[in-house]
Amino acid sequence: MMEKSKLLKSIGNLFSKEEGLDELLKMSEHWDGYKRESAVRRLGMLGNPIAIPNLILRVNDWVPQVRIAALKAMKMLAVPENSAAFVMSLPSLYHLDKCTRSSHAELIEFIEKYLILDINKKHLIQGLESGNSMVARACISLIIKNNLLDISPIVIAGLSHRDFIVRAKASSLIRKLKPSDQQVALELAIKDRFMPIRREAFQIHIKAGASSEFIEPFLFDLHSSIREIAIKHLLDRDVDVASIYINSLVAASLASRLKIAIWGVAELSEVVAISRVEELLASPYASVRKQSLMTMVGLQGEKFEGKLIEFLLDSSPAVCKEAARLCMKLDITFTAVKLKKICSSSFYKHSIASSIGLSKKINKWERLLFLLCLVGLLDQSEFIDMSMVDNEVVTWNADFNKSFSQPTVRQIEELLNAYDKNRVRLSLCLQRSLIITFKTCGFLK
């Protein structure tokens, strides 16, 4: 619900207060139900719309008599002079639909019918331009539902609003416009920041017979959904889309365009571009490196495993995270030694975090060995500390029974060696936990 203080201030800027109003508003929040009921009745008789936010709260009061009095007071305030205040209060009114002390459908329907009257609807239309997004959303929904305005003004006003939901509601009407009005609306919608609106406009253009020259720039739209539509329609027209993307791998000067070109090569499975994409793995732009990784894995699959692991050490958290995700996608098997090597070679905290995340997907004994190896790296890396290791071992203990795998002879030997080597750094609690585990599994006598 819109904060009552903000709503009061907004309505107060349009309407003047009367003597005694503040006392009644304060009394409507009194702990005594009788006093609240009395205040609500008097607010209804006073007729000042500044009381609407308080009355909406009281409509959902925990005392039935107060709710009934508030409902009657709201209906008393529903006069033409107060319609602007009710429009501003629509978000709070609709919030009542989520309140369960009583059904508020009757009140909501009553206010809606009151607002769509010819004498009041001008305030709903003005609400389309409201700076309050929730008010604008409520207004455009009522206007569309009750046909209070011609489609063209609704669409133009809606598409010009800063709220994306208001714009989306308006865009749903574009197909119903006359050709002349539709063209104006499409010029706004095709440039919209919100993808569904842009896509709707793009599809309308295509259905109307847009040329290949018009569609081609959308191969580099910011959203893949629109790019996929552009690719499909251009391929149906025998346009060499692959060449457009491949040429952009060399000619593109902007990182954003280069990233999309790399995406396009993968989308079309153009293996001829592998060498160029591989060069872009060394790009100074993190977004380009990340997209190149995704494309190389898509085009080469398991053949790219060795190179992929190197990017767990990338300076960009996003690239490192994507490399870890792709490692799991390819089901690459890591050992404690491999993960320890990554952590010992890393200069970045995100590489350590990714290695720990990958360790959760390996054999549980190999994971424990890796965690004990991390203790040995405490002096080598500023990003590793005992609290991190303690937390991960606690998680390991909690997940112990999720796997019934038994350790190999090699793992038992390495676990005991790692424990003896790093025992002095472990907390007493962690030592006891590991000793119990080792004895229970027969490692120690």
Image (tube, grey):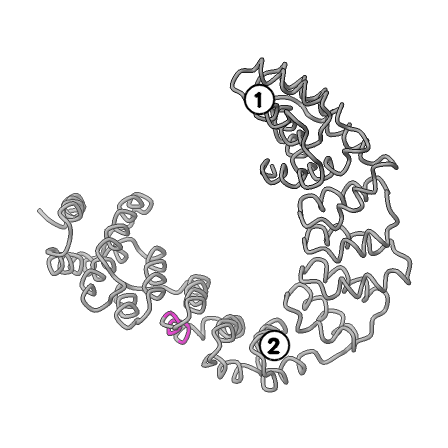
In the image, taking residue 445 as reference, residue 373 lies left or right, namely: right
Image height of 429 relative to 249, above or below: above
Q: Which residue matches tag 1?
A: 27
**Dot 2 alpha-carbon crowd within 10 angstroms: few under 14, some 14 to 19, many 20 or more:** many
- Which residue is at 60% across, 28% downward? 22
Residue 280 location, x and y as percent? 50, 81
Identify which residue, 445 or 42, lies in the foreground.
42
Is 133 inside the magenta-drawn segment? no
Q: Quadrant of residue 271?
A: bottom right
Q: Nearer the viewer, residue 63 or 97?
A: 63
Seen at 75% across and 58% down, the residue is: 160
121 versus 265 height, above or below? above
Q: Main secondary structure of the magenta part?
A: helix
**In the rendered structure, which amino acid carries the disc numbered 1?**
Met
Residue at numbered disc 2: 257
Give the CA distance from mark 1 to mark 2.
62 Å
Image-quadrant location for residue 415: bottom left
Which range is magenta? 307-312
- Residue nearest the observer in this picture, 423 or 369: 423
- Amino acid type indicated by mark 2: Arg
Between disc 1 and disc 2, the foreground one is 1
